[in-house]
Image (cartoon, rainbow, N blue to C red):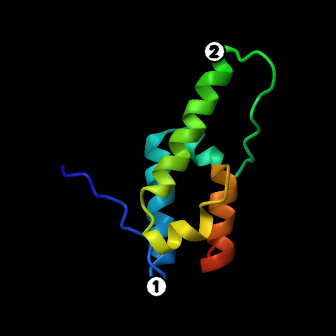
Amino acid sequence: MPKREVPKLKKDNFVAWQSLMKLHLGSVGDYAQNSIVTEHVDPTGTLTIEDMKNKQEHNQTMLEIASTLNYAEFDDIKGCDTAFKMWKALLDIYGGD
């Protein structure tokens, strides 16, 4: 079965993009879906293997979101340093639940 890609976010397709993006993040892993509803906090001090794994997974979620944005929409969230902030900014700008 061919894999359906998440379309690039445009100003007029946010609701469809949001639904497909949530499904996509669910297919990536629970951590990806959690990253858009829970603020990520970078650990301090000596990093454990678990800390490094969590950081990598969080960065992957940010990349998954950013890779589905057109340049104009990326400009709207490029200053966000967590997936949660990216998602919230997109909701604030384009609407949605």
Residue 86 position within the rendered picture, expressed as x and y whole percent measured from the top left: 63, 59
Q: CA distance from mark 1 to mark 2?
A: 42 Å
At horizontal 71% and vertical 18% (from top left) the residue drawn is: 47
Left or right side of 5 for 12 = right
Dot 1 amino acid type = Asp
Dot 2 amino acid type = Ile
Which element carries disc 2, helix, strand or loop? helix
Specify the farthest residue to the bottom.
Answer: 12
Q: Earlier in the sequence, mark 1 or mark 2?
A: 1
Residue corresponding to mark 1: 12
Residue 94 position within the rendered picture, expressed as x and y whole percent measured from the top left: 60, 79
Q: Does 85 appear above or below 26?
A: below
Label tally? 2
* Label 1, residues with CA under 10 Å away: few <14, some 14-19, many ≥20: few
Residue 48 position within the rendered picture, expressed as x and y whole percent measured from the top left: 69, 14
| 18, 62: nearer the viewer | 62
At horizontal 43% and vertical 52% (from top left) the residue drawn is: 24
Check contact, mark 1 vs mark 2: CB within 8 A: no
Which element carries disc 1, helix, strand or loop? loop
For the question of whether residue 79 can be seen, the reply is yes
For the question of whether residue 95 can be seen, the reply is no
Q: Which mark is residue 49?
A: 2
Quadrant housing residue 89 = bottom right
